[in-house]
Amino acid sequence: MLKRIIPCLDVRNRKVTKGVKFRDNVDLGDPIEMAIAYSEGGCDELVFYDITASAERRPIDIDMVRKVAKVIHIPFAVGGGIETIDDMYRVLEAGAEKVSVNSLAVKKPAIIAEGARQFGSQCIVLGMDPVKSDNPEFSSGYEITTRGFREFTGMDALEWAKRAEDLGVGEIVVNSVDADGTREGFEVQLTRLISTNVGIPVVASGGAGTPQHLVDVFNEGAADAAIVASMVHSGDYTIKQIKDELAAAGIDVRRNW
Amino acid sequence: MSDRPRFGTINSVIAIIDYNAGNLTSVKLALEYIGVDSEITSDPERILKAQRVIFPGVGAAGSAMANLQAMGLVETVKSVVANGTPFLGICLGMQIALEASEEDGGTACIGLIPGNVKRFVPSIPVCKIPQIGWNTVQIAWPHPLFEGIDDSSEFYFVHSYYPCASSDSYVMGETAYNGVRFASAIGKANLFAVQFHPERSGRIGLRMLQNFSKWVPLC
C-alpha cells in the first residue's frame, strides 16, 4: 500500500486561500487550475474545503465540484457546508469520490451512519479539528472543535474517532488546530494515537512544512496519508520533490503518473 | 437518477449499467475526457444494444444483487456477456461477476467467471481495512487492456473484500495487500474485470478505459 500525498485546497469565494491556525487568510489562485496542476504534478488525491460555507450556513458550491470532476481523474473529497444526506448525494453525484463531514458529524452523528449506509463507508470522511487541552477530562489531551475552530465541543479526540469508526466512516482526517498553517511539522503523537487505535485509514493534516515532516508522520505517526497545503501552495516544494524524498527515506509512494 | 440525458435514437458507444450501486458520474466523466460517448442507463434494451458495456459499482454485494434482480438486470448482464459484447466490470461489478461473495453473510452472485470473493482478515502487521488508496498491479498476462501500461503500474483501490478466480488462467493482474496476493484483474473472452478504479487512476487508468473503448475481443 502506497502512502498518499493530498494537497488541500481551502476555497473561499471561488479562490483557494490559506491562513494560519484558521485565521488571516490570503488568496492563492483558481481552484480548478490548481487542481489540474497538482493532479498532473503527481498528487494522489485532492481535498477541497468550502471553508466559509459552514460558518456562513450556506450550501456547498456544487458547480465548482462539477468543474473539478470534469478535469481531474484521481479521487477528490469535498467538505464544508454539508448539512443533509441530500447535500452528500449532490456532492457525490457531481463527481466527488468522498464527502468530508466535520461540524455536521458532531451535531448529528446519525447522519454519518446514514450516509455510510446509503453511499458506502468509503464515501464518508470524518474531518476532525482537535486542539490541545490541559483539562484532565480529555484523556487523549485533545478536545474536538468545530465550525472552523469557532466552537468547542467538550468531546475527547480519541473517543470521537472511535465513535465515528463505529458509526461507519471510512477514513478520518486528523487536522491539528495547533499545527495548522505553521509549517513546523505534523502533530505526530496525536496522529499516532488516533491511527493505532482505529482500524480505518487516518490522514494527517496540519503543519506540513518540509518533506521530512511527511517522513516523520508516516514512520512515527503511522499515518496512511498526509495533507499538504502551504508548503506546496507557496511553491517551495513540488509533489515530485516530496515524493522523491519519501522514496529516498524508504517510504513507498506512487511514482508514475 | 432517472432524469439523466438520453441520446435519442442513437445507440451509445458504451452503456454504463446503473443499478443503484454507487456513483457512476466519475466513470462517465472519465470516458467524456477521452472522447468516448457513453450513457448511464438501467434500461435492459439499451444495455443489450450498446456496443460496449461497463458494469461498475461500489457498496455491498448483497444489496447490489438484490437491486439487479429487482431491476431485471441479471439476465441482461448474462446476455450481454454471452453475446460477445466487450464487457468491463469495475470494483463491485467485478466481484459480483464471480460466483459467490462472503459479504452480507454469503451472497450468490452472477457467476460469469468461476471464483469467489473473500473478506480481508485483519493481520499482523496491521493493514487498514478497507484498502483505500493506490497499489501496484503486476501484469500476469499481456491482455489488450494493459496495452501501453507498464508492469507494476499504480491504480486506485477501495475495497474490503477481494476476488479469487478459481483458475490462474483467468488472472490477468495481481495485487498484494494485507498478506494476500489477489487477482486485481481477471479476464475471460469478452469479459474483463478489475478490482481497482480505472476512472480514478489518473492517466494510466484513462489509458485502460481507452484500450477498452477500442478492444476487439478474439471470440
Image (cartoon, helix red, strand yellow):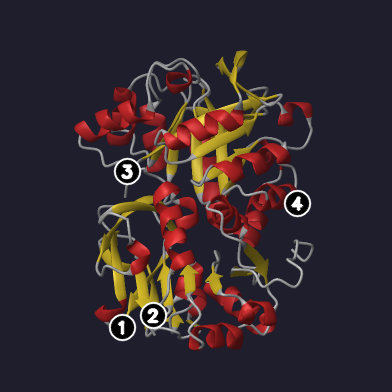
Subunit under mark 2? B
Question: Which of the numbered marks, if any, corresponds to residue B166?
Answer: 1
Determine the CA span between mark 4 and mark 3: 37 Å
Q: Secondary structure at mark 3?
A: loop
What's the residue type where badge 3 is placed?
Answer: Asn
Q: Are marks 1 and 4 on the same chain?
A: no
Tell me the mark number nearer the camera, choosing from 3 and 2: 3
Determine the CA span between mark 1 and mark 2: 8 Å
Subunit under mark 1? B
Q: Nearer the viewer, residue A5 or A150?
A: A5
**Which residue does the image show at 59% across and 88% down from the upper left?**
B75
Residue A158 appears in the picture as rendered: yes
Earlier-in-chain disc, 4 versus 3: 4
**Which residue does the image show at 59% across and 21% down from the upper left?**
A29
Q: Nearer the viewer, residue A64 or A114?
A: A64
Question: Which of the numbered marks, if any, corresponds to residue A86?
Answer: 4
Residue A138 appears in the picture as rendered: no
Give above or below for A129 relative to B216: above
Question: Which of the numbered marks, if any, corresponds to residue A256?
Answer: 3
Tell me the mark number nearer the camera, choosing from 1 and 3: 3
Task: From the top left corner, tell me how far across and down residue B17 is, in percent.
Answer: 61, 71
Q: In which quadrant of the rendered view does residue B13 lie?
A: bottom right
What's the residue type where badge 1 is placed?
Answer: Ser
Determine the CA span between mark 3 and mark 2: 31 Å
Task: From the top left corner, tell me how far across and down residue A86 is, in percent.
Answer: 75, 51
Quadrant location, the C terminus of chain A: top left
Residue beneath disc 2:
B116
